[in-house]
Amino acid sequence: MRKSILLLIIMLAITQPMYGVRIKDLVEIQGVRKNKLIGYGLIVGLTGTGDKAGSEFTLRSMANMLRNMDIVVDPNLLKVKNVAAVMITASLPPFAKSGQYIDCTVSSIGDATSLLGGTLISTPLYGPDGKVYAMAQGPLSVGGFSVAGDTGTGVTKNIPTVGRIPRGALVERSIEFGLGSRLSLIMNNPDFTTAHRLAGAINTYLGKDLAFAMDISTIEVDVPDEYRDRIVDFVALIERVDVLPDTKAKVVVNEKTGTVVMGANVRISTVAIAHGNLSIRITEEPQVSQPPPFSRGTTVITPRTGVIAEEGGRRLMVLPSGTTISELVSALNAIGITPRDLITILQAIKQAGALHAALEVI
């Protein structure tokens, strides 16, 4: 068990004034999102670290690729140690246009040991609708390596079977987004109070009642007539509006690492806390029994065991009603508790019904 446990207590805006957050950091615009692309291809040019001879799908893929080039070869005669079958994934940004380049990630799906030094052959990337949206090709950038000897021993750094191709996929098909005359703002953290404040902040900033909260996570904003042909300008206008988000009182505990994170809204009713630790220390010191000179006795070593038991932290602490998280932490530090003790005390306070916050254990 680790000798020391990390204690991390984040107190949000306890004594400092609260500052607003940009709407841009609180919401996403419905319809403006990335689209996931996927494809299957082959990596060539490896130095004997490709798929093994038993990789049937790699052999058939090579045979099909050569057949498309008017070269007919029996798959059973092919060697694949310099070739690896891979899956290619990429994210198509919103409003991406044909001719732009995007990054792609290449991952081995066979038993190749390393993709270092390989080159991806031209591979189509498909969207969820089955259409080709990009073509990927190029040399891989791998942030690891794997070296093995004939006896099976070797050295591996990072993950050599996954690599990236910066700007390795060329966009072939554009995706058009129609924002229309009404914007739907989707909140990242749904909350009734924050949704109400967000709609009110937009209306105050624009001087018109154009925004209203549809539900706990959706704010509808009507685009003014003067911005119908300038949607980008209107979105940029409302994105910089500041809103003070509201948060639910919550305490998050990670018992594995001893980490405790508390929000500023956590409150505690009147409660008395008595916490003590029982420490038992066992010492063993050998004693030597030496016989007198010229006697026929023998030297004997006898163990001497000592047991010391100490109980600390006998003080009783009373927390008044309405105690803030800052006062709680200061009081608990005063009696010298450890992170593990803090977790136990918080669970006991919650069980007693005095902790007015959600206690989440991860």
Image (tube, grey):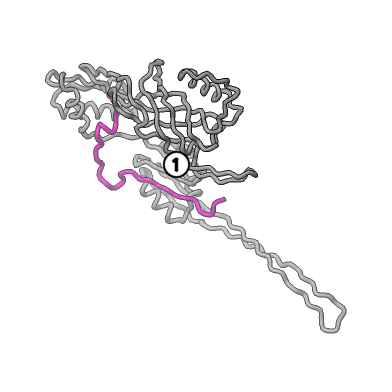
Seen in the picture, residue 24 relative to 262 is either above or below; the reply is above
Where residue 36 sits: x, y (%)?
39, 24
Between 228 and 152, the one nearer to me in the picture: 152
Query: Is 163 on the left or on the right of 24, as rendered?
Result: right
In the orientation shown, which residue stands out farthest toward the front? 71
Please name the predominant secondary structure of the magenta segment in the image. loop
The residue sitting at 43% across, 27% down in the picture is 121
Magenta-highlighted residues = 1-29
For mark 1, what is the residue? 143
Question: Residue 268 at what x, y percent from top left?
Answer: 40, 42
Q: So how many labels did they put on this image?
A: 1
Q: Is residue 181 left or right of residue 31?
A: left
Which one is nearer the viewer's eye here, 170 or 303? 170
Identify the residue shown where x is 35% and y is 45%: 11
Q: Please identify the residue farthest to the bottom as the structure is shown.
A: 294
Task: Identify which residue, 202 or 82, lies in the foreground.
Answer: 82
Residue 21 lies in the magenta stretch: yes
Quarter occupied by residue 30:
top left
Residue 23 belongs to the span the image colors magenta: yes
User: Residue sitting at 40 percent across and 18 percent down?
Assistant: 128
Which x, y percent locates residue 340?
50, 48
Q: In the rendered structure, which amino acid carries the disc numbered 1?
A: Gly
**Picture coordinates of residue 6, whole percent (x, y):** 46, 50
Which sits in the foreground, 23 or 227?
227
Farthest residue, direction right:
296
